[in-house]
Structures are given as structure tokens and as C-alpha cells.
Image (cartoon, rainbow, N blue to C red):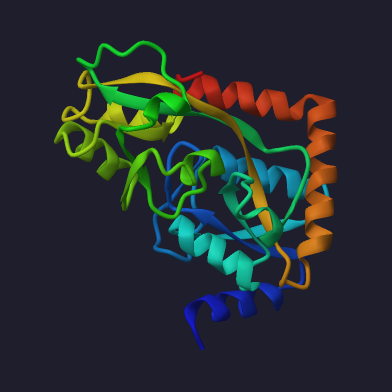
């Protein structure tokens, strides 16, 4: 029996209603691996929000921490009921069940080297440029399918920044808050990278599994719980406290 299946068996044998989900392990401050290994819960704002939303529906969650591409694969195959944090694209829209509204929004930013004089850029300005992105993440289809942009992939956001500073690429794509946190937390990066433009403002979702027996029901319950939290103000309070805590807006 695999460790994931064993964890699911343990979860489903408990007397309380418990939902098994997967969360991304390397995207602070939203979802990042906590102490205890891959089957331990990740930590971050998205983890707190997912737990709070399901609590409004009388459900508890068990969240395992895995790389994002594996997270989405587990949800697609039904090994877990859902995966976060995903954006909806033309390429994945039909593969999962999506709640409404989105959990939160983040800017997908273009970052260049500090000495880059280019003014505010847009997606079209990347044509003819060498641009790196993180393998396995969900990016706008307009970017992924534009053959005029020279694309390179990296294993992590940190690797992207190293590629940029080593001049292997001209620009990289990072979500604004997680990007600035990585840059500012490292003396190797701080002061050497700047935001040069905007690709899109993206919503982020919990992608529910079409193959999991609870997927459809949980997507509906999550929609109900998140809408309730937005109406009663508890969502905004959580978001404001989070933004104040991390210091980025």
C-alpha cells in the first residue's frame, strides 16, 4: 500500500467528515511545505483559507504537501478530492471541477534585471525575448501558445531568478507577492531584480477532481462556504490580516 493510499485510508476511517486534499509545497506565502515531510500539511494563507471555508460546511480537511504538478495529477486522477492553488486556463478548464468565486487573486508579473530600462511591459512585449517560467505551473494560454516568445522552463521559482541573473534569459514570470518574497529574502537576489511589467491578474482556485467520488459535492460546498465568508466579512478580515502579516499588497 502506497503512503498516499494509506493516508487516505486513515482519513476515511476517522469518525468525523474529513476531506483529503493536496496543497502546493513551494509557493510561499500561500502554500509551502511545513515540517514533517510530504504527508504533513503545508502552511500558508491558502491552507488557512481552505480549512476555514470547509469549516463553514461542517467539514475538516487533511492536506498533504506535494509539488504542484503532482498535486494537479493527484486531483485529475482522483487520488485526492482537489488541489490548490490553480489558475483556470484553456488547457485545464475541462479537466477539473471549479468553484466560484476564486479564492484570491495574484498578479502574474514580468521580472527583469535591475538595470533593465524597459518601461511597463505587457505580454506582447515578450515576443522575440527569452522568457523563463516554472515547469508544471498553470500559466495563461495566451503565453504558453505564443510561438513568438522563446520559452524556457525551470524546476522552481528560485531557479527562475538564478536563470535571470546568470543572463540565460531576458525575463522571468513570477506571481508578484511570492516573487518579491523570494527576492527580498535572499541577499543573492535582493536589489538585483525588478518588476518590469504585467502579464495578467489571475484568480486562484481549488481544482476539484472529476474522478473523485466527493469531487462534485465538495466543489459545491466550497462555493457555498466561500460565498458565505465573503458576505459576512470573515474572508476580508482573513485577507487583510494576511497582507499585514507578510507586508506585501
Say whether residue 58 is visible.
Answer: no
User: Quick one: 18 or 222, which is closer to the camera?
Assistant: 222
Residue 127 image position (x, y, % from top left): 38, 31
Examine the image and state in which quarter residue 160 appears. top left
Question: Could you tell whether 169 is left or right of 128 in the image?
Answer: left
Q: Is residue 204 above or below residue 245?
A: below
User: Quick one: 123 or 100, which is closer to the camera?
Assistant: 123
Examine the image and state in which quarter residue 35 appears. bottom left
Question: Could you tell whether 156 is left or right of 24 in the image?
Answer: left
Say whether residue 234 is visible.
Answer: yes
Q: Is residue 211 above or below residue 181?
A: below
In the image, farthest residue toward the bottom: 1
User: Quick one: 191 or 30, which is closer to the camera?
Assistant: 191
How many numbered tags mark residues here? 0
Q: Is residue 136 above or below residue 233?
A: below
Residue at left 62%, top 55%? 92
Residue 71 image position (x, y, % from top left): 52, 61
Examine the image and state in which quarter residue 21 appears. bottom right
Residue at left 70%, top 43%? 52
Residue 90 image position (x, y, % from top left): 63, 49
Question: Could you tell whether 153 is left or right of 219 in the image?
Answer: left
Residue 83 image position (x, y, % from top left): 60, 57
User: Quick one: 201 or 124, which is closer to the camera?
Assistant: 124
Residue at left 67%, top 38%? 103
Amino acid at each position: 500500500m502506497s503512503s498516499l493510499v494509506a493516508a487516505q485510508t486513515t482519513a476515511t476511517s476517522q469518525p468525523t467528515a474529513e476531506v483529503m486534499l493536496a496543497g502546493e509545497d513551494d509557493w510561499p506565502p500561500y502554500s509551502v511545505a511545513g515540517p514533517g515531510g510530504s504527508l504533513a500539511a503545508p502552511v500558508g494563507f491558502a491552507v488557512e483559507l481552505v480549512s476555514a471555508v470547509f469549516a463553514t460546511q461542517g467539514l475538516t480537511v487533511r492536506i498533504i504537501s506535494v509539488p504542484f504538478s503532482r498535486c494537479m495529477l493527484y486531483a485529475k486522477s482522483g487520488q485526492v478530492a482537489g488541489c490548490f492553488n490553480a489558475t483556470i486556463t484553456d488547457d485545464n478548464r475541462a479537466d477539473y471541477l471549479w468553484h466560484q468565486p476564486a479564492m484570491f487573486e495574484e498578479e502574474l508579473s514580468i521580472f527583469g534585471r535591475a538595470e533593465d530600462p524597459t518601461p511597463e511591459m505587457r505580454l506582447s512585449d515578450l515576443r522575440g525575448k527569452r522568457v523563463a517560467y516554472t515547469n508544471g505551473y498553470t500559466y495563461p494560454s495566451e503565453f504558453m501558445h505564443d510561438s513568438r516568445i522563446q520559452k524556457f522552463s525551470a524546476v522552481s521559482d528560485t531557479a527562475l531568478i538564478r536563470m535571470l541573473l546568470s543572463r540565460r534569459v531576458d525575463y522571468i514570470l513570477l506571481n508578484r507577492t511570492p516573487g518579491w518574497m523570494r527576492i527580498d529574502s535572499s541577499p543573492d537576489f535582493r536589489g538585483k531584480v525588478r518588476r518590469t511589467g504585467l502579464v495578467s491578474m489571475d484568480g486562484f482556485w481549488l481544482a476539484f477532481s472529476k474522478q473523485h467520488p466527493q469531487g462534485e459535492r465538495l466543489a459545491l460546498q466550497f462555493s457555498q462556504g466561500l460565498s458565505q465568508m465573503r458576505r459576512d466579512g470573515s474572508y476580508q478580515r482573513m485577507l487583510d490580516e494576511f497582507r499585514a502579516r507578510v507586508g506585501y499588497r
